[in-house]
Amino acid sequence: MNNTLHILNGDATLPGFTEAEIPGDIMIWREVLSEGPVIKNVASAAFWQLRSDWICQAFGETPEVYNDGMIVPLENLNAPYEEINLWFEFDLHCQVNLLGVLMMLNQQTNLSAPEVYLISPSEFPGLENFSGMGELNGEQLDYLYDNIRVQLTDYDFTLAAEAWQLYVEEDAGKLKTWLTDTPFWGNMHNLKPAMEAHVKRLEFDADGLNYIHQKLLAIYKNGAHSKAEIYPSFWQTEKIYGLGDRQLDMYLQTLTNKKLIDLQ
């Protein structure tokens, strides 16, 4: 076993990462904690059962596939690594997953805790529409590792715990107050914009639509009547949410159920 673990958010970054030849073991975090139900104690069996049930229902996954892809790799977090590197992007999807990982690490009682580092780019030199590390090659990931990697402090973990608590509570008012009252974001520089974007998901209009529903509806009314047209239009302005096809489909389904759109 290496003394270093790299946790990648999703499989997209793996090809470039393998190319980068950065030493250490690799674990893929295959979750979308930004969608569906969550409870506070990420390290509990109840948490993962809740997630498994929801993922299987929402995405037609089987419990076995979820267990092998997500639960089994979690055992890495109990191994005696001296260093853990977290590769998580700027968008809400990645930042909520990052909070989940940090809560897991926080709840490990091993006193000789590993040093935890974060690689979380919101842009990349020379790339105009940077949307994630999945589009980077080995050399570019090496560059990030050498230039933007930061060691997380106790303050960062405290901040993450506060953010996670508020995320679980789903109270837009409390979250807004916290965002306003937090004077310093430590090394969690992408957390504030992501949580500001999340506030807009917690606020609903008279029709029961949040910002994402409203945005998709506006795109539809603008003449994009198929998913193939709607997705890129949404991603163009709303990459802060980090929503993939399958997540967007859930929001579109709500609009369809309310008879507000009729997709081609």
Image: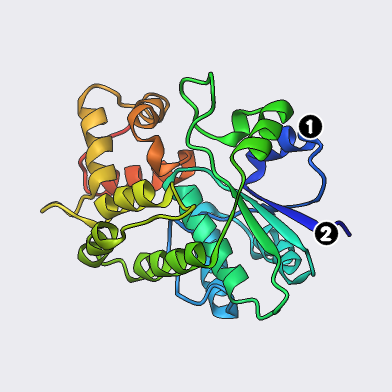
Residue beneath the point at 78% across and 56% down = 4
Q: Is residue 26 left or right of residue 2?
A: left
Residue 242, located in which quarter of the rendered image?
Answer: top left
Q: Could you tell me the amino acid type at mark 2?
A: Asn
Circle 1: element type: helix
Residue located beneath label 1 in the image: 19
The percent coordinates of residue 209 (x first, y second) are 21, 50
* Foreground label between 1 and 2: 2
The quadrant the N terminus occupies is: bottom right
The quadrant the C terminus occupies is: top left
| Label 1 vs 2, first from the N-terminus | 2
The percent coordinates of residue 152 (x first, y second) are 57, 58
Residue beneath the point at 73% across and 59% down = 83
Q: Could you tell me the amino acid type at mark 1?
A: Glu
In front of the other: 63 or 105: 105
Residue beneath the point at 73% across and 37% down = 17
Count of marks, rendered view: 2
Residue 33 against residue 242 in the figure, above or below: below
In front of the other: 54 or 71: 71
Q: Is residue 116 left or right of residue 176?
A: right
Residue 94 against residue 100 in the figure, above or below: above
The percent coordinates of residue 176 (x first, y second) are 23, 59
The reply to whether residue 261 is visible in this rendering is no
Q: Is residue 18 left or right of residue 136?
A: right
Residue located beneath label 2 in the image: 3
Q: How packed is label 1: few (under 14 Cα within 10 Å), some, or many (20 or more)?
A: few
Residue beneath the point at 36% across and 51% down = 192
Q: How packed is label 2: few (under 14 Cα within 10 Å), some, or many (20 or more)?
A: some
Residue 120, located in which quarter of the rendered image?
Answer: top right
